[in-house]
Amino acid sequence: MSHRNARLTVHGRRILVERVLAGRPVAHVAAEMGISRPTAHKWVRRWRTEG
């Protein structure tokens, strides 16, 4: 679930994770989607541990 000020919805986070898992650099995907690298890494890490 996203909070009101979230840059990306749950769907957007899924797209980010899919792009990273497909081999795209986290920094590039984060920049394209308007979020920071640490946030992108956090979402990918959460997906890997929690699914």
Image (tube, helix red, strand yellow):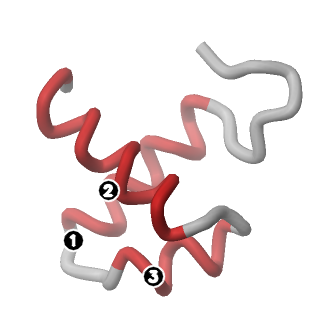
Q: Position of residue 41 (x, y in %)?
A: 36, 58
Classify 10 Å Cα crowding around label 1: few (below 14), some (14-19), many (20 and above).
Answer: few
> CB under 8 Å between callouts 3 and 1?
no
Q: Quadrant of residue 2?
A: top right
Q: Is residue 48 left or right of residue 19?
A: left
Q: Which residue is mark 3?
A: 27
Query: Is residue 13 depicted above or below 18 in this figure?
Result: above
Q: Which mark is residue 22?
A: 1
| Amino acid type at image mark 3 | Ala
Q: Nearer the viewer, residue 51 or 35?
A: 35
Q: Quadrant of the C terminus?
A: top left
Secondary structure of residue under mark 2: helix
| Amino acid type at image mark 1 | Ala
* Residue displayed at 46% across by 61% down: 38
Q: Is residue 23 left or right of residue 34?
A: left
Of badges 2 and 3, the one in the foreground is: 3
| Amino acid type at image mark 2 | Glu
The residue most toward the top is: 1
Cα distance in 3D space between marks 3 and 1: 14 Å
Q: Position of residue 24 (x, y in %)?
A: 31, 82
Q: Which residue is mark 2?
A: 18
> CB under 8 Å between callouts 1 and 2?
yes
The residue most toward the left is: 49
Q: Which mark is residue 11?
A: none
Classify 10 Å Cα crowding around label 2: few (below 14), some (14-19), many (20 and above).
Answer: few
> CB under 8 Å between callouts 2 and 3?
no
Cα distance in 3D space between marks 2 and 3: 14 Å
* Residue displayed at 67% across by 34% down: 9
Q: Position of residue 11 (x, y in %)?
A: 56, 36
* Residue displayed at 38% across by 47% down: 42
